[in-house]
Amino acid sequence: MPSKEVNPDLLKERQTATFDPHEFSVFWAGGEERYKEKKSLEKIFLEDPELKDDLPISYMSHKELYEHSLRKACIIGEKIRKLRADGEDGVDTYNALLGGSLGAAILKEGNPLSLHYVMFVPTIMGQGTMDQQVEWLSKAWDCEIIGTYAQTELGHGTFLRGLETRADYDARTQEFVINTPSLSAYKWWPGGLGHTANHAVVVAQLYTKGEFRGLAPFIVQLRHSDTHKPLPGIDIGDIGTKLGMKSVNNGYLGLKNVRVPLNNMLMKNQQVLPDGTYVAPKNSVLTYGTMMFVRCALIRDTALSLAKASTIATRYAAVRRQSPIDPNQPEPQIMDHTTQQLKLFPQIAKSIVFKTTGDGIWNMYNVLSGEIEQGNLDRLPEMHALSCCLKAICSADAAAGVETCRLSCGGHGYMDCSNFPTIYGMTTAVCTYEGENTVMLLQTARYLVKVYGQALNGEKLVPTVAYINDALREREFVNFDGSLESIVKAFQFVAANKIRIAYEQIEQRRKQGHSTETAANLSGTFLTAAADLHGRAFLAESAYKELLAVSRQVSPALADVLKVVLELYLVDACLNRIGDFLRFINITDKDVTTLEIRLQNCLRQLRPNAVTLVDSFDLHDRVLDSVLGAYDGNVYERIFESTKKNPLNKEPVNEAFHKYLKPFMKAHL
Amino acid sequence: MPSKEVNPDLLKERQTATFDPHEFSVFWAGGEERYKEKKSLEKIFLEDPELKDDLPISYMSHKELYEHSLRKACIIGEKIRKLRADGEDGVDTYNALLGGSLGAAILKEGNPLSLHYVMFVPTIMGQGTMDQQVEWLSKAWDCEIIGTYAQTELGHGTFLRGLETRADYDARTQEFVINTPSLSAYKWWPGGLGHTANHAVVVAQLYTKGEFRGLAPFIVQLRHSDTHKPLPGIDIGDIGTKLGMKSVNNGYLGLKNVRVPLNNMLMKNQQVLPDGTYVAPKNSVLTYGTMMFVRCALIRDTALSLAKASTIATRYAAVRRQSPIDPNQPEPQIMDHTTQQLKLFPQIAKSIVFKTTGDGIWNMYNVLSGEIEQGNLDRLPEMHALSCCLKAICSADAAAGVETCRLSCGGHGYMDCSNFPTIYGMTTAVCTYEGENTVMLLQTARYLVKVYGQALNGEKLVPTVAYINDALREREFVNFDGSLESIVKAFQFVAANKIRIAYEQIEQRRKQGHSTETAANLSGTFLTAAADLHGRAFLAESAYKELLAVSRQVSPALADVLKVVLELYLVDACLNRIGDFLRFINITDKDVTTLEIRLQNCLRQLRPNAVTLVDSFDLHDRVLDSVLGAYDGNVYERIFESTKKNPLNKEPVNEAFHKYLKPFMKAHL
């Protein structure tokens, strides 16, 4: 083991901090109570020797990794049972264990039982009738059955109406007959489907009395309860190795004339009566709600990924010394290179802004849920549009930020023991799942173009797009004085203009004779650009409001740091879209240089607090799981120690030398 | 096996092409002769059943992968021997087999013998005396000894003077005593060092007669010739799993009082006499040359990576159908979505421009080499500056482009069988090795700032920076008419202004009392931005010149396509830096919209030729190694077939069910 002493360079960094990291950690955890719950869960789960790895999983084959992960998933499941039995399963237990920070510490490439907890059980709760919940929920809750959620198909993803799997009701036997009629209809991707789950909610096109009724969810048993063998008509397996999420056991599923009883269709929203009569759902708003819920949660996930990556890279940048700034001086901490600061500090700022924005949007979602339950659907489209573009922007920025952090560590970031490759794999996946990012931006854009038309007609828009009314009224943005408020306003003005152009592009093409849909496709890149700016304007405003609000509640010392974070975030965001600012707002070359110098000043101001800021994210060494990012900063000792676990190094001479290399080398002799 | 029939969507695409793909393929290969050599090598290497994998390597553990790769590396080595004996090893044999397209087809995660061929042998040739070449070269050439090149250390990379490994000459025994005096001095990263090589060129700080003499290269035997056991004083092993290049067997090396004879120091450039007298090298230009050589080669590598990724993604986009553009129409090929075109087509254009620029710079390098041999070093700094920033820009853009292609394939791009994860791992590595990208940009910037000062003093600059003279003379850019030539000129004008600002920033900070070095560090982000624009201006000019030159030599049909590629490249490049254009050049919002519409027109024009263009890159299915990108386009069949090779799927029930899951599920019963 590396020595317990903290690297002196890190020690020095911690002494220059101007604020109390504990105060920030409590804020970051969401308050005293959640902070304590976090610490208690860490104790229960991270100190259990059964949940530690002797062999780093990167050395395992795919099969070994699955077996290893299922073992741990069962131990976690057993511990959750115990916590529940003791009444100690708090709000955050499931979040933390299934994908959150704690889950990543134990099963860094994902948990093959996750979808059971986060999709199978909630779907029964949300879409099953009371009777169905009684029948299925307790079994699922106790893990007597393990389920997953099978919707996406090999040939069909985002466009749900394109799904091919079909369920035909047979009134004679009161059963549904479920089929995947082609290869492209095979269910593909569900976590745990490969070899773990014995049940699934299968989403299929419903036909009763020979008529098409739309999509419906069915509980299908996949494997025998005792032998775990696939049941007749079920073709099932693991889809193979992936860029990341390597131990989720994503599976495929073919169904051939698989019959399930009438009661296996989840019927809370729509019903099939025994004679095959179909009763349509009242409205589809609730499923809309679930998608938004998931996307809002994902925004917080991206903040966590970025916090992990920036913690590792910032600590490393304090310890690593390279390339003298002045030839007569020794090699400095690489964090003293301005170019290094520009790589790292914006990622720290984004971690904080994505987190506070994620929390803010979570609160908006809860208010909205309440309104929906009271039948008020007014803000639903607005909220949907916002959650789509924020999911896209935060996941894309977080993934890019993780890579920036990795590359900032040079070659060492390329090693798996840095943990960057795993963090990247988990983060970039968010760009694709739960709505592919470009599709998300197009959904937002469709809403924006619609409300732009309303604003042109003089309608007053809802809060998150009200800036369009302002822009139409003011036409020109005259007061860019560089203040933070003015940057936020400018972002909105720029967004309004990008929406205007998208709107005009569509109109122009319609006038050329294209249908609205074709016109929208031909204007696709204008639409995604508009949605991007809308999301960034919201993030800018949210950063401004939330961080100033927090600053008023914390100590002046912490408030000062948060204000630097805010300024850094806004100036950096503005410079990253400076083309749009210059295009629509009357600013000069000199103004831009002023902003660039201001960015450098922010970097300089953050420098003494950088390490303590990432310390305050309070990410356990097991969560970071990085030789470069541990709290003690003993980077080289930890890298070297990691080589001792490498199975290749257990023998001084690998047998491949005798089998292949020696005969090849001696061939001439 | 999938059916041999080509997917009808791909067939259709190939029928809409307006040019002859074979004509392009021959141009791409570098002429008829090289095209034939390429085909012949493919036959020899790709049709050998011994070099095919039954089990995809992503299913192997790290140890299994090493053994598998060493076996193949030896087979390749044996074939190279045979080709050489038959006099059939042409210019491209080594390039193609060691990292090029063919190498990647056989050992997609790299060859543990590569560094022997590309670094060990050339270093002896370049830095050994005639006598030393006689002694070592034939053994190395015949692979009786296997070597690697050990320079980078655990704690030291780019800054060579910081290396800690030292060689002390002992005149008494006429030996060097080599030591890595600390953990951070351990050699780290050399390919094949782990368990493969039995020799290495070790770069160390030389001390003779108690005095420091600078860096020198030493041939050190690491392992016993027969037993392959590490020799006394040698601590050696594999550094562990990585993001990519997984079978290169990167190693670490600690040396403790390892003695090598006087003659093991490579002495072509500098000498140590038996009594310890040191004879310094005449100049260090030659090592400079090697670095440039490698960087020029890397530019072509990035073009190949991007060509692979865009081939896979473009073919997939022709086969995959999703999300109706018009609700009454069936789901279109996703390539019909404008947003998809904007992801793919610029990558195709960049592949072509990086390739032609790489070829162009290769020719410049050869001219320069000739000049250097005649003692003319005039263009060396210019060429060095250019190779640095182009290496940085092309590698960064290629890595980002590969990810854009991967993400454009949705979830399927995330599967290892798409081959995107491997291509990305190989491509992003180029951002770090052979000079980390930020360091590269700073080196270019140092040159640019220097010549800017010269231009201010009225000096006439060398060709690649002569645009600075023009910009200083003209002050304003008045003739932006949107023509391709004017975009190229505008790029140069913008670059000159970025250099001006970097220069002014440094001057200003010097006036504030900072040393030049500190001023440069404080202006670091201005410097990298200036170098970035310099490189992009060069790429723009190179694209313009090279592609128009090619267009004049090929058929009108192909010339027309290349002109669209050129316009797409330039307009896209301009829009990607539109902030800088708006900042320094008087263009309006409307001008920008015009450029954006023009980009869309380019996409539309390229659409019918997109598949045929990537076909013309003529990348063998084994080189692509992708279920999504094969020539026949049978995507879903190939994906499904890949699951049959997954070891997890060989048993219907994994033993982990019985060991872990069943007890967990039945615990309550």
Image (cartoon, coloured by chain):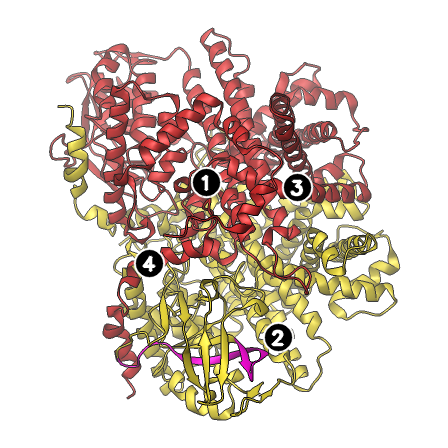
Chain colours: A red, B yellow
Query: In the rendering, which numbered label is found on residue B288?
Result: 2
Tell me if residue A20 can be seen.
yes
Query: Vertically, is B275 above or below B380?
Result: below
Per the image, the residue denoted by label 3 is A576
Amino acid beneath label 1: Thr
Q: Residue at x 16, y 43 (%)?
A: B655
Relative placement, left or right, of B415 versus B504 is left
Q: Residue furthest top?
A: A374
Q: Label 3 is found on which chain of the structure? A: A
Q: Nearer the viewer, mark 4 or mark 1?
A: 4
Query: Vertically, is B647 above or below A622?
Result: below
Q: Are discs 3 and 2 located on one and the same chain? A: no
Per the image, the residue denoted by label 1 is A427
Q: Nearer the viewer, mark 2 or mark 1?
A: 2
Q: Nearer the viewer, mark 4 or mark 2?
A: 4
Q: Nearer the viewer, residue B259 or B283?
A: B259
Q: Disc 4, disc 3: CB below 8 Å?
A: no
Amino acid beneath label 3: Asn
Q: Which residues are magenta?
A: B205-226
Amino acid beneath label 2: Tyr
Amino acid beneath label 4: Lys
Per the image, the residue denoted by label 4 is A644
